[in-house]
Amino acid sequence: MRDGKPDRGALASSLLLDWYDRNARVMPWRIGPQDRAGGRRPDPYHVWLSEVMLQQTTVAAVRDYFRRFTARWPTVQTLAAAEDEQVMAEWAGLGYYARARNLLKCARAVAALGGFPATRDGLLALPGIGPYTASAIAAIAFDEAATVVDGNVERVVARLFAIETPLPRAKQELTRLAATLTPQERPGDHAQAMMDLGATICTPRNPTCALCPLSSLCDARAAGIAAQLPRKAPKAKKPTRLGTLWLARQGDLWLVETRPERGLLGGMIGFPGDDWDGAGGPAPLHADWETVGEVRHTFTHFHLILTILSAETTAPPERGTFSRISPAALPTLFRKAFDLAASRPRPST
DNA sequence: AAAACGTGGTA
DNA sequence: TTACCAAGTTT
């Protein structure tokens, strides 16, 4: 620019936006580039809700959850007024349950404020909103020229500038470089374009460079190392843990307990179990327990193999409460155990 | 600052 | 089956 050379960031952004105008993915929470140009704005509530759901979660998994949440709670005020258990139940199966707890805290804070803060800094102060989400909402809902850096953007930028430093060490440099691409005009479309490009063209394994609007500017492409970037530090092997789950039944009622707010599956309904450390533990009530099978499940940082014990009983429990449950309100691990025990034939009365 | 925190799809 | 990956945040 000042030196007369074309600004690489501005050129990249321009090419990217042209591509986005023709190739933007359609999503329930998104205002497409055409409507956007016509002056339509996305509802900040929709942007926030979708962004939180999309944290470490695929678009395919989020779609139906987003539709159910917005059908049931059309505004942040209605969500703020919802009961915790209802929101946790609606989130069940989506994972990372701290998001749902923070979602409610955030909705209540926003309702108390009378609306969403319109700046990145203001958004950053809210629970469950970190650097990525604050930038995304600021850019998409409020046209702030904030730089959005998610896994897609890290990959696109690492390749565009051929950054060979492995993640997470490269994070700061990638953020700095991503900022050189962020335009003052259409920052929200730019952010979504970067993510669409990363999700559909500049993919982790086999990038389709032939279709990429930025291929002529891409250093990694020129060096023939696009598919090798970004480099990542090797991950630790997951340990395997063993445990037991007790599924006690009284007709249509099952013995369940609400898990502590903090920690794994926090705040969710679950069946009583031991500590999943292989040591076993006392059953929640005295009964003639029958082994009905085994459930294997993998969490972020360990594999789990649970023995599922079941009993039909009227004995008083030492833990938990007998309740009518909806399998859909259970985290996936417990839903697997439920499916096993519930499908078990039992003596008719 | 490293570790905790879910799930389902894909190679 | 195993490992990686997906619009990260919190402690």
Image: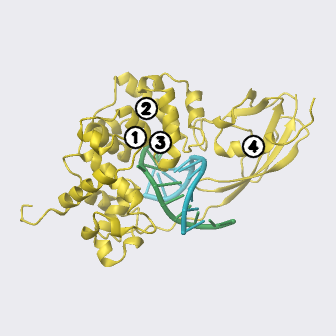
Chain colours: A yellow, B cyan, C green
How many tags in the picture? 4
Given the image, on which type of amino acid does mark 1 rest? Ile
Q: Marks 3 and 1, how far apart in space?
A: 11 Å
Q: Which residue is mark 1?
A: A129
In the picture as drawn, the residue positioned furthest to the bottom comes out as A223
Q: Based on the displayed image, in which of its 4 quarters is residue A334 positioned?
A: top right
Tell me the crowding category of disc 3: few under 14, some 14 to 19, or many 20 or more residues within 10 angstroms, Cα based. Answer: many
| Chain-order first, disc 1 or disc 4 | 1
Name the N-terminal-most of marks 4 and 2: 2
Residue A114 picture location, percent across and down? 34, 22
Name the N-terminal-most of marks 3 and 4. 3
> Which element type, helix, strand or loop, lies under badge 2?
helix
Residue marked by disc 2: A106
Provide the residue designation for mark 3. Answer: A53
**Residue at the spot of label 4:** A339
Mark 2, Cα crowd under 10 Å, few <14 / some 14-19 / many 20+, is many
Q: Chain of mark 2?
A: A
